[in-house]
Amino acid sequence: MSALQPIWIHGSSLGDVNALRALSAQLHERGHPLTLSASTASGRTRWEMLIDQAFFSNAESVRLSAPPLLSPLHVERSLRESRAQFLILELLELWPPWVSRWAKRGVKIIVVDGRVSARTMWARPLLSRSFASLSLFLAQSELDAERAIKMGCDPAKVKVCGDAKIDSILHSLAKSDVPADAPQKFELILGCVRPRDEASLVAGLTAYQTSRPDDRVLIAPRHLQRVHPLLKRLRRAGINVQLYSELTSLTDSSPGSIILLDQYGELATLYYHTHCAIIGGTFFDRGQNLIEAAYAGCGLIYGPLLQSQRAHAAAITNGGGGQVDSWLSAFQLAARWQSERRHELSVDRDALRRLQGSIERQLHEIDHLIFG
C-alpha cells in the first residue's frame, strides 16, 4: 500500500476536535492528505481555527468538509471527492449509512478514543453491523474494549490505547506561551458550564458575591450558543456582567468584575490566571474534562457526577479534595479557600503523566494497518 493515504477525520463537537488535534497533526506531518469534519458548528469552527492558526504545516493538503450524513448520494459523493482510504471517528461517531457504505467500498474504518456506555449497549441491534465493519476499535479502557466486542467488533481488531484527550491537551499547552508563573487575573473560574448548571450557578454566584464582592469571576459556557441566554439570566438576577470579547486585555477587569467568556479556544490558557476553578457538567450531567484546569495548577472543585471522566478524576484528584454535591456547596468551598488563601486539592502530576501516551499507541496501530 502507498505510504501516503488520504484520511478523513471526524469528530462530533468542539471537545472531540480538541481530542483529535494531536493525532491529526501527527498524521499530517507524516504526509497524509487530510479531510476534516465535525457534526456541530462549534466543532467545525475549531477545525477552521486550527487551520487559520497554521496548526497544520501544509494547509494545502488539509481540507474541511461537511460530514456525509444527509443521504446515500452525499455519502458516495464525499468518498469520490476525498478519495479517502481511511476514516477515523472520535469516541463513537458510528453513523451506520456512512460507515457501512464506505466499508463496502474498501475504506478502513477506525474508531479512536472509543467509549461504549451502558446506554450504547441498548443500541446493539442498530449498531452491530457498524461495529462488525470496523478495521480498528482503539478503546479508552478495558471495559470499553469488552463492550465493543459484545457489540459485534472482531476481538482481533480491538486494542486498548487510552484517551488521547490528555495528549492533545498537553500537546496544545506545550505550544502556548503562557508562563508557568502567570499572574492571577481571576479569583475564580467557572468552567465548562452547561445549560442545566445555569440556574444553580446564578443562585450560588449571587450568594458568593455577597461574601466576596471584590472577587473577579470568569464564567465559561460549554457551548457559545449559551452565551447570550446566560448573559440575560445573569442580568435579570442583578449581576453586572461583561463579555470577555469587550476587554482589550485581562488587566481591564476591575475588582468585582464578572466576565462571560464568549470566544473559542481561550479557556485552557485562562486557567493559568486563577488559583481556583469550579468545573461545570459535574453536577447534573455525566462529567466534564478536569485535565485542562488540573494541568494549569488550579484548585479543582467539582460535583459528584464523573461517569465519563472517572479514570481521569481518580488519577488527578486522588479521589477527593474538592468534590461537593451542589453548586451552592462549590461556591461556599471556593469562598473558604479564597479567605484562607489555600487550595486543598493538590493535583497528582505524576498520575497525569502516566495517563499520557495514547497518541503514540494509536499511531502505532494505525501505522500497522496502513503499512501492514
Image (cartoon, rainbow, N blue to C red):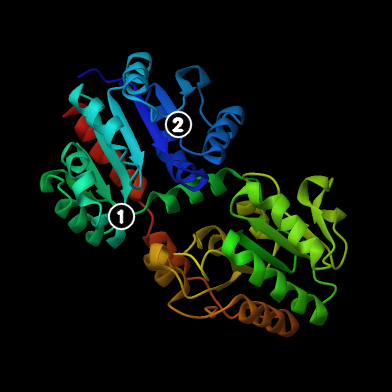
Instruction: Point out residue 54 in the picture as x, y percentages from the top left corner.
Output: 58, 28
Q: For this view, does 335 lie left or right of residue 78?
A: right
Residue at image position (54%, 60%) is 295
Q: CA distance from mark 2 to mark 1?
A: 22 Å
Q: Amino acid at mark 2?
A: Ser
Q: Dot 2: few (<14), some (14–19), or many (≥20) neighbours within 10 Å?
A: many
Instruction: Point out residue 298 in the picture as x, y percentages from the top left corner.
Output: 61, 67
Instruction: Point out residue 243 in the picture as x, y percentages from the top left corner.
Output: 79, 51
Residue at image position (49%, 59%) is 289
For numbered disc 2, what is the local secondary structure?
Answer: strand
Q: Amino acid at mark 1?
A: Gln
Q: Dot 1: few (<14), some (14–19), or many (≥20) neighbours within 10 Å?
A: many
Residue at image position (77%, 50%) is 244
Residue 86 lies, with reference to residue 262, above or below; the image says above
Residue tagged 2: 37
Q: For this view, does 155 lie left or right of residue 210?
A: left
Q: Nearer the viewer, residue 169 or 259?
A: 259
For numbered disc 1, what is the local secondary structure?
Answer: loop
